[in-house]
Amino acid sequence: MCHAIVMSTAESLDPGLFSRLVDNLYVEAMVMADEARSYFDRQGLQDKEELDVIGRLSFTCESLKVTTRLMHVIAWLLTQKAWRRGEIPDEALNETRYRLGQATSTDADVLAVMPPPARDLVTGSEALYERVRRLQESMVRARTHVLQDGAEAALPTAGPGPARDLLARLERAF
């Protein structure tokens, strides 16, 4: 019989450090969402008109992709905040509805024809999405630890290394 022990990378971090990490990512995502909305509703409309028909269609698709990426990130970060406040149980974090949604990346050929501000928003939203995706993956790996026969055991403790040194410096800084 197998039993899953729920553990999280976030649980091993100082609660304040995890909250600041999520808060900072949330602020970054919200600022980027506001920049995207502002650009695509104003200057982007003018930039789009300067493109050919295929370019305009690609521009529209990319604006939707940027919005989708950012909304997935924001939803995931809000889930983490709710989890930290105890509004979502540990076990529920494995459910699909609490996971980061899938987002399509942009083709390099399409990106090459985008106006510079649109290109910056596309690459910025992709980079933010990737950072949050990697954070989620590390949390899922740490959270899902299956044990045999109901025996309880802790995940192995990581030894010294550059990542631990960086984490220690971050904890001291905040």
Image (spheres, rainbow, N blue to C red):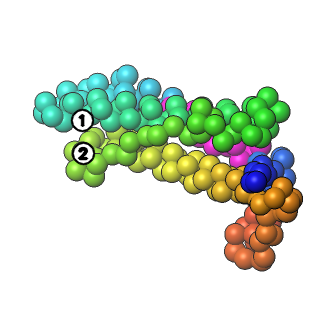
Q: Residue type at mark 1?
A: Ser
Q: Position of residue 149 (x, y in %)?
A: 81, 58
Residue positioned 38% across, 42% down in the render: 104
Q: Which residues are magenta?
A: 19-33
Identify the residue position indicated by label 1 in the image: 58
* Residue 170 is a magenta residue: no
SS under mark 1: helix
- Could you tell whether 153 is left or right of 28 in the image? right
Label drawn at residue 88: none
Closer to the camera, 111 or 158? 158
Which residue is depicted at the point 66% across and 42% down?
Answer: 94
At label 2, which amino acid type do we have?
Answer: Val
- Marked residue nearer the N-terminal end (2 or 1): 1
> Looking at the picture, how far across and down is residue 18, in whole percent?
76, 48
Q: What residue is pinned by disc 2?
A: 110
The Cα–Cα distance between marks 2 and 1, rounded to whole angstroms, is: 7 Å
